[in-house]
């Protein structure tokens, strides 16, 4: 709720309705709470936290390349909690790692990451990534190509974080220029996903992935999600799972989380340790 409240106030600043609310003087902030109480209450009640941090693509890209190597098949992506779907455009951005680069040279967004410990091997970055379909399931998908959708995402980036704003702007512009945009499905992904998996193709690797969504699910719901994936994999059609591991599975601390990949019928493996916003990466070969 504090994040929702500050974002709601920031939205008023960005939209020009309360330009001084985040001046740094508490009196301005308190005055905005009083003057815009109804609007703030409505935004807090309506909009959950929506960050859609594209820096996390620095951990998703090598993970998807590893999944590709395991099967040699094109990918069909299904993201759980995609927000505006900016991470579903993972192959449209440019990346620079210690051992090489990946992505279009003329990409609007270039991402770098601090690699600690093991680094992403050059051989991984030399692989081709073919994404045939992009879908996401979110309780409240955001259309970032609209003014309101963009401001909603922007409002969750606090003043002063200029690099994050620049990344968001470049990713949104990439989305606007994309002719075949990701398909965003409104709904509870624990309820919607089984039907999508039942209808998945046999000639592509369906990769279900998420970054920092499932760690907040109640344990019983997380277990049901895992069971649904396991059941779907039993039919033999290609399936993979990429996810930040939950707390009880040894996810780590607030500063370091384990990123796991499973390509059925193989077992899950930890492919990296990452920070919550994708700024650091310790690749595990």
Image: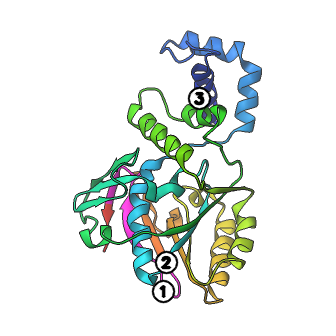
Q: Label 2 near label 1: C-beta < 8 Å?
A: yes
Instruction: Give the magenta part as a residue range.
Output: 262-281
Q: Is residue 79 above or below residue 171?
A: below
Residue 277 visible in the shown view: no
Q: Position of residue 210 (x, y in %)?
A: 55, 61
Q: Position of residue 87 (x, y in %)?
A: 51, 54
The residue wearing badge 3 is 6
Q: Position of residue 150 (x, y in %)?
A: 59, 35
SS at mark 1?
Answer: loop
Residue 22 visible in the shown view: yes
The residue wearing badge 2 is 262
Q: CA distance from mark 3 to mark 2?
A: 37 Å
Viewer-side residue, 118 vs 73: 73
Sooner in the amino-acid sequence: mark 3 or mark 2: 3
- Quadrant showing the N terminus: top right
Q: Is residue 254 magenta?
A: no
Q: CA distance from mark 1 to mark 2?
A: 7 Å
SS at mark 3?
Answer: helix
Dividing the picture into quarters, in which one does residue 218 lie? bottom right
10 Å neighbourhood of mark 3: few (<14), some, or many (≥20)?
Answer: some
Q: CA distance from mark 1 to mark 3?
A: 44 Å
The residue wearing badge 1 is 266
């Amino acid at each position: 709720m504090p994040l929702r409240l500050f974002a709601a106030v920031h939205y008023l600043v960005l939209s020009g309705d309360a330009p001084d609310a985040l001046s740094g003087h508490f009196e301005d902030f308190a005055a905005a709470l009083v003057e815009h109480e109804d609007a703030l209450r409505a935004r807090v009640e309506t909009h959950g936290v929506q960050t859609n941090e594209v820096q996390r693509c620095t951990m998703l890209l090598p993970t998807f390349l590893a999944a590709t190597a395991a099967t040699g098949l094109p990918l069909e992506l299904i993201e759980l909690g995609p927000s505006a779907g900016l991470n579903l455009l993972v192959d449209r951005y440019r990346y620079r790692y210690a051992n090489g680069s990946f992505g279009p040279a003329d990409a609007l967004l270039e991402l770098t990451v601090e690699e600690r410990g093991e680094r992403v091997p050059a051989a991984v970055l030399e692989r081709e990534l073919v994404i045939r379909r992009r879908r996401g399931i979110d309780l409240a998908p955001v259309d970032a190509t609209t003014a309101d959708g963009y401001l909603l995402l922007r409002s969750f980036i606090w003043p002063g974080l200029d690099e994050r704003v620049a990344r968001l702007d470049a990713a949104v512009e990439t989305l606007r220029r994309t002719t075949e945009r990701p398909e965003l499905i409104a709904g509870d992904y624990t309820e919607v996903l089984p039907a999508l998996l039942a209808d998945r193709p046999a000639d592509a690797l369906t990769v279900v992935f998420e970054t920092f969504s499932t760690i907040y699910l109640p344990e019983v719901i997380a277990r049901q999600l895992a069971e649904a994936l396991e059941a779907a994999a039993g039919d033999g059609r290609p399936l993979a799972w990429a996810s930040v591991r939950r707390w009880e599975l040894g996810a780590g601390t607030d500063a370091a989380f384990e990123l796991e990949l499973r390509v059925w019928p193989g077992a899950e493996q930890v492919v990296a340790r990452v920070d919550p916003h994708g700024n650091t990466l310790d690749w595990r070969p």
